[in-house]
Image (cartoon, grey):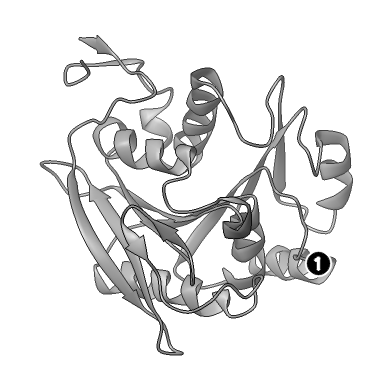
């Protein structure tokens, strides 16, 4: 058994994919699946702000794809929103500050439905949380997982709409976040009564450090597939 470290990549079936939006844009991404079994649930991930360096390989999302298919039998879909580039490639279109990105979110959910991926949850980080709150109310979505939500573009009307939608929402809010800290988050999420605001002591917006990443992934798995939480810190395939 080796310890799981920041650069550990555990076994999975990994497939480069393309998503096709209703407005004619092709998005590039990757689907990671358990190596030798069907997934029990699915994370559709939405990355941080691309104009500030966010993309499908932003480290928490990459580590989710590197670990969770093996540790929790999850499918993890990552993709670059329009105009965003990563080593996987550049998605078509241009950044639209959360507007036309509604087509990107819809294309990802359509892909998950087409592939018969089970129990779909949206996992957004920063800008991705606004995309989830504004554009993610789809019958396929069983819940939201929000990392460092700034509530920058999402409004009280969006929160009230999620309240009526009734799906569970969990917000992981760093103690030292740059945009929204726990006390204010509790106040700002008040229009969404089922929102669970989880303060994370010592954490910052970017979740730097292995302990922060492990906390995020543990909290995610505890909501999506509770029987697999807490996650192990060792694995036979870890070096």
Q: Looking at this view, is 134 or 91 the one in front?
A: 91
* Crowd tier of the residue under label 1, counting other residues whose Cα lies within 10 Å: few below 14, some 14–19, many 20 or above: some
Where, quadrant-wise, is the C terminus in this rendering? top left
- 39 in relation to 167, above or below: above
Q: Identify the image quadrant of the N terminus.
A: top left
Report the residue at 86% width, 51% height from top.
Answer: 188
Q: Residue at (76%, 35%) from the top-left corner?
A: 177
Work out whether residue 18 can be spotted: yes
| Residue 45 in the figure: left or right of residue 5 | right
Is residue 167 among the parts visible in the rendering? no
Question: Outermost residue toward the left?
Answer: 36
Q: Residue 10 placed where, x, y %? A: 23, 30
Which secondary structure, mark 1? loop
121 to 131, vertically: above or below: above
Which residue in the structure is indicated by mark 1?
Answer: 155
Q: Please tell me in which quadrant of the rendered image residue 162 appears.
A: bottom right
The percent position of residue 170, horizontal first and vertical second, equals: 63, 45
Query: Foreground: 223 or 134?
Result: 134
Q: Horizontal and vertical percent for residue 159?
A: 76, 63
Question: Which of the pair 3/37 is nearer the observer?
Answer: 3
Q: In the rendered image of this protein, does residue 127 appear above or below residue 172?
A: below
Q: Give percent across and percent down for residue 6.
A: 39, 23
Q: Decide: is 219 above or below 237.
A: below
| Residue 29 falls in image quadrant | bottom left
């Amino acid at each position: 058994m080796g310890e799981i470290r920041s650069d550990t990549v555990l076994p999975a079936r990994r497939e480069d994919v393309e998503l096709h939006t209703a407005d004619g844009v092709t998005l590039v991404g990757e689907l990671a699946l358990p190596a030798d079994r069907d997934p029990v649930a699915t994370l559709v991930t939405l990355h941080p702000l691309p104009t500030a360096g966010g993309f499908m390989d932003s480290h928490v999302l990459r580590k989710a794809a590197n670990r969770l298919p093996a540790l929790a039998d999850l499918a993890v879909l990552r993709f670059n929103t329009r105009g965003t580039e990563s080593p996987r490639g550049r998605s078509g279109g241009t950044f639209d500050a959360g507007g036309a990105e509604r087509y990107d979110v819809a294309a990802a959910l359509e892909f998950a439905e087409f592939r018969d991926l089970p129990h779909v949850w949206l996992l957004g980080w920063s800008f991705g949380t606004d995309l989830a709150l504004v554009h993610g109310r789809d019958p396929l979505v069983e819940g939201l997982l929000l990392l460092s939500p700034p509530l920058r573009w999402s409004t009280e009307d969006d929160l009230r709409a999620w309240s009526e939608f009734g799906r569970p929402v969990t917000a992981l809010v760093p103690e030292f976040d740059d945009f929204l800290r726990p006390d204010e988050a509790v106040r700002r999420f008040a229009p969404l009564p089922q929102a669970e605001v989880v303060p994370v002591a010592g954490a910052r917006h970017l979740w730097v450090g292995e302990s922060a990443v492990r906390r995020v992934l543990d909290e995610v798995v505890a909501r999506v597939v509770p029987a697999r939480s807490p996650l192990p810190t060792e694995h036979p395939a870890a070096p």
